[in-house]
Amino acid sequence: MWVEKYRPSTVEEVVGNEEAKKEFIEWIQRSKRGEKRPKEMGIFLVGPPGTGKTSLVHAAAEQYNFHVLELNASDIRTGRRLEEALNKIPKSRPLDVYMDELKFEIVVFVDEVDGVHGSSDRGGLKTLLNIAKRRDMLMVLSANFPDPQKHRDLLRGFKVIRFWPLTTRQLAMLLKRIAQEEEIPIGDEVIGEIASRSIGDARQAINLLQITAAGGGAEDVDLLDTLPITETINRVLTELDERKIRRLISASLSTPQNLYRALAEMAATSNLDEETRCKVLDALSRIDIFMGRIMKTGDWKMLREVTYMIVGAVSTLRDAGASYVDRIPTYIFFRAIRARRREKVREIALNIGRRLQHSSRKAIFEVFPFLSFSVKTGQVWMAEALGLNEDDVKILKEIEL
Ligand SMILES: Nc1ncnc2c1ncn2[C@@H]1O[C@H](COP(=O)(O)OP(=O)(O)O)[C@@H](O)[C@H]1O
Ligand SMILES: [Mg+2]
């Protein structure tokens, strides 16, 4: 997987955020020299995903001879295991003989503290603060989107170093280097397109580059040129040449969620017989699982399978006479339902969220528009499957867009 293969191994290789990098290095060097610690308890790297926070910690540790003890959310939740892990670190190691001026050789790194969920996280964060007070190590935290309320103590107590999204130019340069290294034929326009689509997220950019290369669309600026999803679907529905269909799908797989969300919407809202509908939705959920696996393992050979599966789903939909209608933007929808029946809607969202293991926010933004549309077109099967009752369905029907 290219994101791992090209993980920066030195601080210099971490592209962009020069200020943040400089600050981080200064801080750890100061800690290491054993200079009086500033009042902060440690360092808190804050910034959107794919900007190099995790990479910087590991690269810097390597360069400046720190040992990184990485703790995850569950280590923190169960404070006891955490203490055990810390106590395993020998108080004095052979290195100390040569470098006895070095005070902080251990970085306790808690990546993505904002991912620490559950009712016990207050206890977890408290444990964290207690450990941070220890003077024999340096604590480094990271978060993509810290919560000003929940992480108040961390934001106050730690030295916050902010990461910003990378610029399109920085991303393009990074992609170009990788493309050269991999010897893939890819034009500047495609690189530029991928860079600007990735909105500052290097992980996303590198993944898109690899998908594009694997799909064989590297030279196909024409296809990669941001085809809106409606356009893709309609072209796929009317295109008869299977090779072209596959290429269209490869290109749109760079934003796979949009593609199968659109297909799922079609399956749920078109006038299909139940068997066809179930068949398509079933295929889509398998595709979703496949894509997830590919993103995780980097087994890009499976992408071919996925493309075929999508072709199958699309042709089933086409043969059944399904059509795709572009949705009204969900924020308008959300405002409209907020204005009406706020409480009841929230309750329904909460129930749906529980069923799907989503947040109620996600239920409102992503499931509701879909659900409301389908009950209005006389299809209550999905609402029923989500455990909604007659009254809930009535509310969904009443909601006006
Ligand atoms: N600033 C960067 N420079 C170079 N590559 C980066 C950068 N940020 C992210 N990446 C790429 O994305 C991957 C994930 O980056 P990571 O450091 O885990 O980001 P974060 O922790 O901010 O989410 C890395 O392995 C690397 O391939
Ligand atoms: Mg990270």
Image: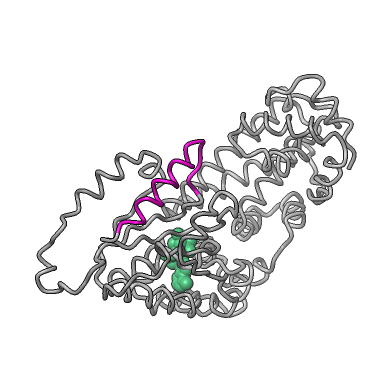
Total numbered circles:
0
- Horizontal and vertical percent position of residue 307: 57, 50
Q: Report x, y in % for residue 49.
A: 52, 61
Using the image, determine if residue 89 lies above or below residue 30. Answer: above
Q: Is residue 159 left or right of residue 319?
A: left
Q: Is residue 72 rendered to the left or right of residue 353?
A: left
Seen as rendered, the residue at the extreme top is: 390
Q: Where is residue 183, by image quadrant?
A: bottom left
Q: Quadrant of the C terminus?
A: top right
Give the quarter of the figure containing the N terminus: bottom left
Residue drawn at (83%, 41%) of the image: 338
Residue 69 located left or right of residue 201: left
Provide residue 136's location: percent of width, then percent of height. Answer: 26, 61
Q: Which residues are magenta?
A: 115-134
Q: Is residue 132 magenta?
A: yes
The image shows residue 115 at horizontal and vertical percentages of: 49, 48
> Is residue 372 magenta-colored?
no
The one nearer the camera, 306 or 49, is 49
Q: Taking 167 as reference, is 312 above or below it?
A: above
